[in-house]
Image (spheres, grey):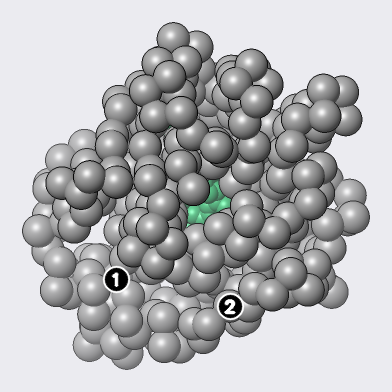
Amino acid sequence: MRLLVCGGAGFIGSTFVRQRLREHGDEVTVLDKLTYAGREENFHDFAGEEAFAFVRGAIEDPEAVGGAIAGCRPEAIVNFAAETHVDRSIAEPDAFVKTHALGTHVLLEAAREWGLRYLQVSTDEVYGSIEEGTFTESSPLRPSSPYSATKTGADLLVQSYFHTYELPAVICRGSNNYGPYQYPEKLIPLMILNALHGDPLPVYGDGMQVRNWIHSTDFAAAIGHVLEHGQPGEVYNAGGPDEEPNMTVVRRIIELTGASESQIEHVTDRPGHDVRYSLSSEKVRALGWEPKVRFEDGLSQTVAWYRENAWWWEPVRSGDYREYYERQYGRALS
Ligand code: NAD
Ligand code: TYD
């Protein structure tokens, strides 16, 4: 396939691009604004390949989107482009509204104009928190943060383009991802890098919140599978095989890095913190996808990757991220 992958310079987007180039022989053009989270370093192992091209631009810019499509004539748009951190959405929601509402609208209009298939990458957070049981695709949408509310708005707009204009659009909702190339503001890479540096490990509240962890290569494969086999107009959940409370995750990272329990620091809880996410993936499993990486193995591979790839995270940890960290946690990194 020829694909336009929006937001392909981020964590999961670049994992998806790598997989499509290596395992499927696709031709891929990435359109990405390169926010703090988007990095050309994420293309380091395929940047020079003929089947790959990169265009810097924003999805809310119709000219950039039209130009990228005219340049690569894709069969489908896969949209990863998003602001993705709940804590940043609480501090500064503006960019979330712009990218998720305006950006998704521009992409949908372009897909309509050029007659393209469309896949929206979404999240389990649109369903809100669940104390027991697991969300299916027909669960009510009850987002609780500006991040998840604007992602939900984007999903509803995508569905309206299927119902109103018969745009062949699908949505794939993933649970919490982890793996190589994840920006260190998120729980797992933040804890790994702090553990390796002897910094405090800031656990929000009691740390008993539960997340349903999926390795980024498994989510990328689910997205590819839905793109190839999904029914237009449908939503497909892709949840990971394991659920863990945050404290268990942090303790495993301490074991894997040789850090000390005394580095754990319980800090003020996130406002409106969702207690538990859990996704049922029966519908996408029926299409033939299943996750391959168990959390225990994936986490130790991820710790090893961060240990071995300081070239990737050193510029991040010594750049703007330091200021973000100080604002968010009220203390400096070592
Ligand atoms: P990320 O923050 O690592 O990457 C986001 C990418 O989007 C970056 O490259 C950034 O530069 C780009 N971007 C942001 N705004 C843009 C804009 N206006 N125009 C063009 N590019 C823009 O995020 P990620 O973790 O890789 O998440 C990718 C997608 O997967 C998002 O849609 C997210 O909601 C969804 N998702 C993430 C998770 C997770 O746990 N990380 C789980 C489920 C779903
Ligand atoms: P995060 O990686 O931000 O993903 P999300 O909020 O989208 O699930 O956080 C995962 C969990 O870890 C969530 O319950 C909040 C918690 N957390 C901490 O306890 N400390 C931290 O420093 C961070 C970033 C997250």
Residue found at x 74% / y 69%: 287
Residue found at x 15% / y 46%: 48
Figure quadrant of residue 36: top left
Figure quadrant of residue 276: bottom right
Residue found at x 82% / y 23%: 165
The kind of secondary structure element at disc 1 is helix
Say which of marks 2 and 1 sits in front. Answer: 2
Q: Position of residue 31 (x, y in %)?
A: 38, 31
Q: Residue pushed farthest top?
A: 63
Task: State which quarter of the image contains the C terminus.
Answer: bottom left
Q: Amino acid at mark 2?
A: Pro
> Which label is found at residue 327?
none
Q: Position of residue 1 (x, y in %)?
A: 49, 48
> Which label is found at residue 192?
1
Residue underneath mark 2 = 291
The answer to whether residue 133 is visible is yes
The answer to whether residue 173 is visible is no
